[in-house]
Amino acid sequence: MQQEKRHQVVIVGGGPVGVALAVELGLRGVTCALVESRTGLQQIPKGQNLTQRTLEHFYFWGVVDEMRAARLMPSGYPIGEVTAYGNLMSEYWHAPPGREIVRPYYFQDNERLPQYRVEEVLRRKMRDGFSTHRCRRTRQLTRQMRASTFAH
């Protein structure tokens, strides 16, 4: 006999926002089901710059050090408002004052890492009790949701 699992929240989409919501709710003791069509991470370097406020959330979730360790750019390279010639690893770049102007108003520095690295760290943080459903089409998701019972 298959046991039904109840969830207080169903999150559709396992990108950085969906996974971050799952982490936040999990830390608050809310049971979640995360529905995502992708099983792996997309190795596309999008969403590179993380603001100070975002890093403050990572701090409270206990993953800020792991996020910083996932950085791809070498330490000391500029991470925002960069003009580069050739590529970001060349010696020819210019970084005008940017985030450091507002630095005194935050207790975390901003960071630069691609979205897939952010997702990777946040997925590891997701707590026990999460159900991840892989669905390719909306109809399949609808059938799975009808077959499941969710708490109100």
Image: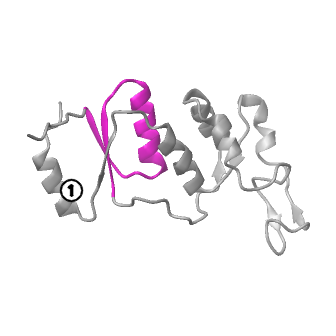
Residue 43 location (% of width, % of height): 56, 65
Q: Residue furthest top?
A: 28
Q: Nearer the viewer, residue 131 or 59?
A: 131
* Residue found 44% across the figure and 38% down from its top: 126
Residue 26 location (% of width, % of height): 40, 30
Judge whether residue 24 is colored magenta: yes
Q: Quadrant of the N terminus?
A: top left
Q: Nearer the viewer, residue 61 or 106?
A: 61
Badge 1 marks a residue whose secondary structure is helix
Residue 35 location (% of width, % of height): 31, 50
**Circle 1 Cα neighbour tier, 10 Å, few/some/many (<14 / 14–19 / ≥20):** some
Above or below — where is 116 with respect to 111? below
Residue wearing tag 1: 141
* Residue found 25% across the figure and 32% down from its top: 8
> What amino acid type should be assigned to the residue bearing mark 1?
Leu
Q: Residue furthest bottom?
A: 86
Judge whether residue 48 is colored magenta: no
Above or below — where is 145 with respect to 126? below
Q: Residue furthest front?
A: 1
* Residue found 50% across the figure and 42% down from its top: 124
Q: Quadrant of the C terminus?
A: top left
* Residue found 86% across the figure and 68% down from its top: 90
Residue 48 location (% of width, % of height): 64, 56
Query: Magenta segment, which residues?
Result: 8-36
